[in-house]
Image (cartoon, rainbow, N blue to C red):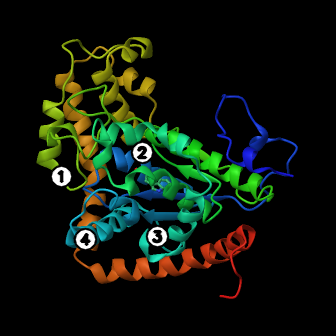
Amino acid sequence: MIDAARRSTPLRQSAKPNIMNDQSLPPYAGPSRVFSGVQPSGALHLGNYLGALVKFVALQDQMECLFCVVDLHAITAWQDPALLVAQTREIAAAYVAAGVDPQKAIIFPQSAVREHAELAWILNCVARLGWLDRMTQFKEKTGKHKERASVGLYTYPVLQAADILLYKATHVPVGEDQKQHLELTRDIAAKFNHDFTAPGFFPLTEPLIEGPGARIMSLRDGLAKMSKSDPSDQSRINLTDDADAIAGKIRRAKTDPLPLPETLEELKIRPEADNLVGLFAALAGQSRGQVLQNFGGRGFGEFKPALADLMVACLAPVTQNMRRLIADPGEIDRILVDGADRARAIAAPILAETRKIVGFWPGR
Ligand code: TRP
C-alpha cells in the first residue's frame, strides 16, 4: 500500500537510486521510439543544425521518430501571433531541408495534438514544486525577476515530460543543456508509475546527447553556447546566412594568436580554437584529432578560409531547400497535417490508458 505521505515525498533527496527506480519492478517493455522538439521562437542556427537536425536524420532509419515543433513551449515567453505561425512552418521546413523524410519520421506542431496539454496537466500533479525549483534553465532565464515570468515558463519542463511520455518515447536526442529536463522526465515517469501502481507504464527515457555537434559554442566567446538569444549576430551562423555572411563571421571569429596545436590536450585549454576545430570536425564527419593531423601547426589565416568553404558547402543545399519550402507553405502544411494525424494515432490510446489509470470518469 502506498500512503499519502510517501506519495508526496520528493524523489531526489539523494543521488542514490530510490524506490522509484527499484530494479525489482518490471521495466518498460514497449517498443523503442524517438521524440524531440525545437521551439519556433527564433531563427535556427548552426548549433541547432549540428546538435539536433543532423542527429534526427541519422535516427530516422533506426527507430520510429517524432519530430515536433513545440509552439506550446514557445508561448511561455511572448510571441507575436503572426510570427509564431510563420516560424512554426519554418522549423518544419528546416527539418525537411536538413533531410528528415516526412514519410518516415512524423513531423508535426505540438499544439495540433491537444493530448500534449492534457497529459501536461496530469503530470503537473505528479511533479513536485521542489523539483521544479531546482531547474537551472528557469533560474537562468528569469534571473532576479522570476515573479514576472509566466507560470507556463515555470512548468515548461513538465510540458516537455508530457511531450515525451505521451508517446512513451524511449530516446530523446537533445543538447547538453536539456540534460536536467530529461532527468526530471524520468523522475516524473517513475513517480507516476509508482504512485498509481502501474509499474513499467511510462518508460525511463534516455537522452541522446553525445555527438560531434553536442557543444557548438559562440563565435565570440568559446565558453558560451551558440544561442539565438545572444544579442550579437556575429556570435552565430544562422541557417539563413548566405555564403558572404558565413565567410565574414568565420573571418571575424574570436581566436588566440597561436597556430593550431598538434595535440588534443593542447586544444582542450584553448576554447575558441577548440570550437572552430570542433565545427570543422562535425561538418566534415571527422574527429578533432583528424582535423589536427591536417591543420596542426598552421595558423588561423589558413584554417579559417578552409572552415568557411566547408561550412558554405554543407549549408548551401540546406538553406536552398529551406527557402524553396518556405515559398510553398502548402507543401509544409500538408506535411504537418499528416504528421499531426499520425502523432495523434499514437498519443490518443496512451492518453486514454493514462486517464483510466488516474481514475477519470470513463463515459466520454
Ligand atoms: N526544451 C527543448 C529545447 O529548448 C525543446 C523541447 C520541448 C523538447 N519538448 C521537448 C526537446 C521534448 C526534446 C523532447 O531544446
Task: Look at label 2 and name its amino acid.
Answer: Gly
Earlier in the chain: of badge 4 and badge 1, it is: 4
Tell me residue 157's x, y (percent): 48, 51
Q: Calculate the distance from the C-alpha at mark 2 to the C-alpha at mark 1.
A: 18 Å
- Depth check: give the residue in front, 160 or 8: 8
Residue located 65% across and 54% down the image? 170
Tag 2 secondary structure = helix
Can I make out residue 233 in this image?
yes
Q: Are marks 4 and 1 in contact (CB under 8 Å)?
A: no
Q: Relative to residue 15, is residue 231 depicted above or below?
A: below
Tag 1 secondary structure = loop
Residue located 27% across and 44% down the image? 311
Which numbered circle lies on residue 86?
A: 4
Q: Quadrant of residue 140?
A: top left
Q: Which residue is mark 2?
A: 51
Q: Relative to residue 273, is residue 3 depicted above or below?
A: below
Label 4 neighbour load within 10 Å: few <14, some 14-19, many 20+: few
Left or right position of 334 against 163:
left
Task: Look at label 3 and name its amino acid.
Answer: Ile
Q: Relative to residue 136, is residue 61 depicted above or below?
A: below
Q: Are marks 4 and 2 in contact (CB under 8 Å)?
A: no
Which numbered circle lies on residue 241?
A: 1
Left or right position of 273 against 121:
left
Tell me residue 326's x, y (percent): 25, 72
Earlier in the chain: of badge 2 and badge 3, it is: 2
Q: Calculate the distance from the C-alpha at mark 2 to the C-alpha at mark 3.
A: 18 Å
Q: Are marks 2 and 1 in contact (CB under 8 Å)?
A: no
Q: Calculate the distance from the C-alpha at mark 4 to the C-alpha at mark 2.
A: 23 Å
